[in-house]
Image: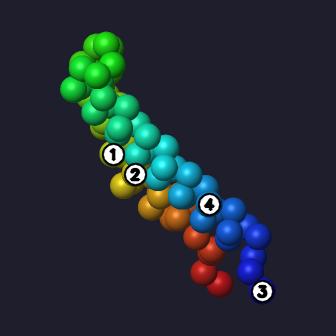
Amino acid sequence: MNDPAQSSRYFAMVAVRFAGVALILLGILIVRRVLELPDALGYALLVAGLAGFFVMPTVLARRWRSPKE
């Protein structure tokens, strides 16, 4: 019934989103000076996290799309 490849791809996309959220939160902690790291690193993590959350799942979905027959 359910294709194992589809479910593993779905979980991969969810994992990418969770990683994006983790990067965003880490970036916020750095920018707000809760963690003593350079601000540039915080902003870079924010950008990477936003890209990972919004862009990467759609890129993965396009890559894994079944070819039209």
The residue carrying mark 1 is 50
Which residue corresponds to mark 2? 53
* Quadrant of the frame with the N terminus: bottom right
Quarter of the figure that contains the C terminus = bottom right
Quadrant assignment, res 2: bottom right
* Rendered location of residue 32, percent (x, y): 21, 26
**Residue 67 vertical placement versus 28 (above, below):** below
Answer few, some or many: residues within 10 Å of disc 1's Cα (few below 14, many 20 plus, some between 14 and 19). some
- For the residue pair 43 and 69, the one nearer the viewer reads as 43
| Placement of 60 over or under 32, stated as above or below | below
Q: Distance between the residues labelled 4 and 3?
A: 17 Å
Tell me residue 42's x, y (percent): 30, 25
Q: Name the residue under label 4.
A: 11
Give the CA distance from mark 2 to mark 4: 14 Å
Of mark 1 and mark 3, the one earlier in the sequence is 3
Q: Earlier in the sequence, mark 4 or mark 1?
A: 4
**Which residue bears the numbered disc 3?**
1
| Amino acid type, label 2 | Phe
Q: How far apart are marks 4 and 1 (CA)?
A: 19 Å
Tell me the quarter of the picture where residue 8 sits: bottom right
Q: Which residue is drawn at 43% across and 40% down?
A: 22
Marks 1,2: beta carbons within 8 A: yes
Q: Kindly state the secondary structure of the residue where label 3 is placed.
A: loop
Residue drawn at the location 24% of the way across and 20% of the way down: 33
Is the residue marked by circle 3 packed among few (<14), some (14-19), or many (20+) residues within 10 Å? few
For the residue marked with disc 3, what is the amino acid?
A: Met
Cβ atoms at labels 3 and 2 below 8 Å apart: no
